[in-house]
């Protein structure tokens, strides 16, 4: 799926995770909003291995753009210079990641969901941050793999133990990224998450 779809799916997964924790945006907005943001970031994180990821494009972190920003910055404006240099460094770090990590490689492994979410958990615990932050991040991360799992290419869920791509849909129902079918599948997945959410809070009854 593309970045926009992953962001939406990550948000939907986060809403479900927050609902299960009984965290409401009305009563706990200072907890809910940051947790929702973390869920969206979790949904986008696996595509850090792609040079065309939504995060990079949205912040205009291309090598050429950040180089021009540094060249146009002036020492007379130290804040502008610091921002430009920081963006330049981040762009170079992303270049290194893109060079060594193939798209839908290690960041799309099932074990990576556990490891990276554990790192976020450790950081939140070390700084005394609310647990909802790492829970929604993990939910968003998992939603990304599910989203890519319904595409034609699939995802290496069980790598490196089982390196082959795994698909969550039969061949005729697998979608091609960027097509109308992706929007339909996204609506279906979000609908399923919303249904589970309503079932959990008692608005609807989940039938097995």
Image (cartoon, rainbow, N blue to C red):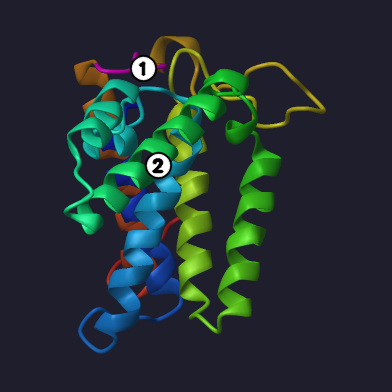
Look at mark 1 in the image and give the residue it sits on: 175
176 falls in the magenta region? yes
**Residue drawn at point x = 52 percent, y = 20 percent:** 103
**Residue drawn at point x = 24 percent, y = 56 percent:** 78
Q: Which residues fall within the magenta stretch?
A: 174-178
Indicate whether 120 appears above or below 161: below
**Residue drawn at point x = 69 percent, y = 51 percent:** 115
Look at mark 2 in the image and give the residue it sits on: 44
Q: Of callouts 1 and 2, which one flags the residue occurring earlier in the amino acid sequence?
A: 2
Residue most extreme to the front: 76
Tell me, for residue 42, which label it has, or none. Answer: none
133 falls in the magenta region? no
Residue 159: x, y in percent? 73, 28
Give the dominant element type of the magenta stretch: helix, strand or loop.
loop
* Nearer-the-camera pick, 61 or 140: 61
**Residue drawn at point x = 43 percent, y = 39 percent:** 89
One can see residue 168 in this view: no
Q: Secondary structure at mark 2?
A: helix
Residue 172: x, y in percent? 41, 10
Residue most extreme to the bottom: 27
How far apart are the alpha carbons under marks 1 and 2? 19 Å
Position of residue 59 in the picture relative to residue 105 (left or right):
left
Residue most extreme to the right: 161
* Nearer-the-camera pick, 61 or 107: 61
Q: Secondary structure at mark 1?
A: loop
Residue 117: x, y in percent? 60, 57
């Amino acid at each position: 799926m593309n970045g926009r779809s992953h962001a939406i799916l990550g948000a939907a997964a986060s809403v479900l995770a927050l609902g299960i924790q009984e965290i409401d945006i009305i009563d706990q907005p200072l907890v809910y909003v940051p947790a929702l943001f973390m869920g969206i970031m979790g949904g986008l994180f696996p595509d850090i291995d792609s040079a065309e990821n939504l995060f990079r494009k949205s912040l205009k972190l291309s090598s050429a753009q950040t180089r021009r920003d540094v060249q146009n910055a002036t020492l007379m404006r130290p804040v502008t210079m610091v921002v430009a240099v920081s963006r330049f460094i981040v762009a170079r770090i992303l270049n290194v990641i893109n060079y060594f990590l193939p798209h839908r490689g290690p960041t799309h492994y099932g074990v990576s969901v556990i490891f990276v979410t554990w790192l976020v958990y450790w950081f939140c615990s070390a700084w005394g941050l609310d647990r909802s932050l790492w829970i929604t991040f993990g939910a968003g991360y998992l939603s990304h793999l599910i989203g890519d799992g319904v595409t034609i290419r699939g995802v290496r869920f069980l790598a490196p133990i089982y390196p082959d791509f795994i698909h969550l849909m039969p061949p005729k129902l697998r979608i091609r990224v960027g097509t109308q079918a992706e929007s339909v599948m996204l609506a279906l997945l979000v609908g399923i998450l919303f249904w589970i959410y309503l079932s959990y809070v008692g608005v609807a009854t989940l039938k097995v």
